[in-house]
Image (cartoon, rainbow, N blue to C red):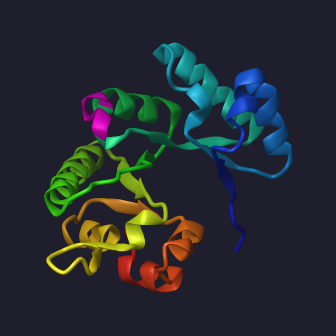
């Protein structure tokens, strides 16, 4: 089995300075995909299609675009851009609820966004950091944000950052087994 590797972030300065040269160097280094798109889908539909063609010519694919839960009203436009650039995923990279009620409202919102994406043939995913795995919620503050995201959503999937998972005190293998296909 061969794996296809991609990158997320980390080259934003380089992309701003020399987008296509940076992407060519990443393709030459063996990368196959990019997450976020570096502004490749923010122009007109024609420009987005041309950017997709240029990515494909380099052997790259844009696999995900970002839409934060606090910008839910932008989701229809992000969905259209994802479809035009050929991305299959839309990612929310950060949430930091401060109470049980806030977290439950976040679960409802992320689930709503996931259902909307699913209806358009895309998958909405949440990318974790360390704080999602630290107990801070529930009646006795024994549940983590990640526990409650899993328990209170069904359509929402996860982009598990195993380094942050481990740093947050969780065992990435157990988390993967628990989440299954999500």
- Give yes or no for residue 144 being in the magenta stretch: no
Q: Name the quadrant of the C terminus.
A: bottom left
Q: Name the quadrant of the N terminus.
A: bottom right
**Magenta stretch: helix, strand or loop mostly:** helix
User: In screen coordinates, is 17 left or right of 46?
Assistant: right
Where residue 179 appears, as percent x and y from the top left, is 37, 76
Where residue 87 appears, as percent x and y from the top left, is 49, 41
Disc tally is 0
Residue sitting at x 36%, y 34%: 79
Where residue 41 appears, as percent x and y from the top left, is 52, 26
Q: Is residue 88 above or below residue 165?
A: above
Residue sitting at x 18%, y 54%: 102
Residue sitting at x 42%, y 64%: 131
User: In screen coordinates, is 14 left or right of 175?
Assistant: right
Of residues 88 and 68, the one nearer the viewer is 68
Of residues 49 and 102, the one nearer the viewer is 102
Q: Which residues are magenta?
A: 70-74
Quadrant of the rendered structure where residue 9 is?
top right
Where residue 29 appears, as percent x and y from the top left, is 85, 49
Residue sitting at x 79%, y 43%: 27
Quadrant of the rendered structure where residue 18 is?
top right
């Amino acid at each position: 089995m061969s794996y296809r590797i991609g990158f997320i972030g980390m080259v934003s300065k380089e992309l701003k300075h020399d987008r296509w040269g940076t992407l060519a160097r990443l393709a030459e280094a063996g990368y196959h995909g990019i997450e976020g798109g570096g502004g490749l889908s923010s122009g007109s539909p024609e420009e987005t299609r041309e950017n997709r063609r240029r990515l494909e010519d380099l052997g790259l694919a844009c696999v995900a675009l970002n839409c934060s839960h606090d910008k839910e009203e932008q989701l229809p436009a992000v969905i259209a851009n994802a479809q035009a650039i050929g991305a299959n995923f839309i990612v929310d990279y950060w949430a930091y609820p401060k109470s049980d009620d806030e977290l439950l409202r976040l679960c409802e919102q992320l689930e709503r966004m996931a259902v909307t994406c699913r209806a358009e043939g895309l998958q909405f995913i949440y990318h974790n950091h360390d704080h999602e795995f630290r107990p801070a919620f529930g009646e006795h503050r024994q549940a983590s944000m990640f526990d409650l995201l899993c328990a209170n959503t069904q359509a929402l999937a996860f982009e598990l950052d195993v380094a942050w998972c481990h740093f947050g005190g969780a065992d990435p293998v157990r988390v993967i087994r628990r989440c299954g296909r999500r």
